[in-house]
Image (cartoon, rainbow, N blue to C red):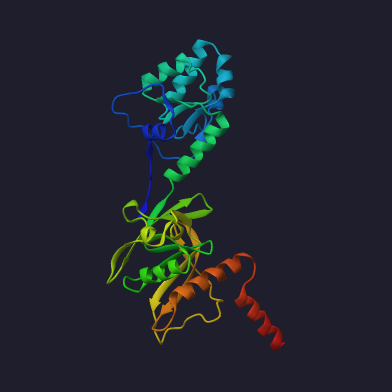
Amino acid sequence: MIVKDKSITVKKIALDLKLEEINSFDNEIARVNSIELNRPGMQLAGFFDDFPYERIQVIGKVEHSFLDTLNFKVRMERFEKICAHHIPCLIVSRNLEIHDEMILTAKKYQRKILRSKRNTTKLISRLFNYLEHELAPTKTMHGVLMEINGVGVLITGKSGIGKSETAVELIKRGHLLVADDAVEIKRLGHEALIGTAPEIIRYMIEVRGIGIMDIKSLFGMGAIKEKTSINLIVNLEEWEHDKHYDRLGLDEKKRDILGMKVDEVVIPVKTARNIALLIEVAARNYRQKEMGYHAAREFEKRLNFTNE
């Protein structure tokens, strides 16, 4: 399930980032749904075309100094126009003094004013990282997520195929469990998919015939990890004699997760196949490709050279 149109309350932002609340209202409902921020220098100068009012508005030292050059009437006019838009909130950095005009117009339109001790650059960086994490598109997938030799591997397959049993074997081989059964995935920007486990089942594995096991207690802290990037998907499926399976590794397959393409390999499961070992090798092979060496393509080159 993908969660769309995520938002977060201004009240929660203030609490999590320890921002000072300059004003408050009954039944505060202001929410933020954009990770982008705006420093309203142009608006304070009177230019309101393409005003990104849906973003948090950050008043830094430069904007504050400019405001000090304006008289009361002009400052009142500029804040009137800013606050008339449905801005989520105004945040003032560096513990700077709050102008009376800001307080008056914020009260009129019920816009939240917050203040931070951080300088403007650090405040913006902290806000952006926080909002990117909180507002990231999310999806929950059925599977097991492990970190194998530094590669985040999402093991998928139908129920009963042996995902959890394979995960236990991989843990015994020194690899790290992130999540079993349900994997919560967040897309951070355009670069990374981060997977973690729901709080209620974190570090737990269910193995049919044994039940629920606490991996942290059984194998220690060195067997678990809170989160990891998802670099490779290994899909387990029952062996079908009549089905064609890639034998060279030239058929590169990808799966779309939250708009990002992730490398995927299919491993057929049958008696006597060591699935944990094969997944470990698949992770090593992925890492080798990322470092610039593709064994299947190298083999193809040798064949072509021999046939010339």
Q: Nearer the viewer, residue 25 or 267?
A: 267
Q: Is residue 196 above or below residue 296?
A: above
In the rendered view, would you say 125 is above or below 47? Answer: below
Depth check, front residue: 21 or 278: 278
Image: 37 above or below 204: above
Q: Residue at horizontal 47%, vertical 44%?
A: 132
Q: What residue is at 50 percent from the left and 17 percent from the top? A: 97
Q: Quadrant of the N terminus?
A: bottom left
- Taking the image as shown, residue 28 lies to the left or right of residue 302, namely left
x and y, in percent, of residue 130 in the image:
46, 40
Q: Residue 222 at x, y = what percent?
A: 46, 58
Q: Judge by depth and name the residue closer to the eye, 117 or 91.
A: 117
Residue displayed at 63% across by 76% down: 297
Q: Whole-percent x and y of residue 258?
A: 44, 56
Q: Is residue 140 left or right of residue 293?
A: left
The image shows residue 250, relative to residue 24, as above or below, that is: below
Foreground of the two, 217 or 6: 217
x and y percentages locating residue 127 in the rendered image: 49, 36
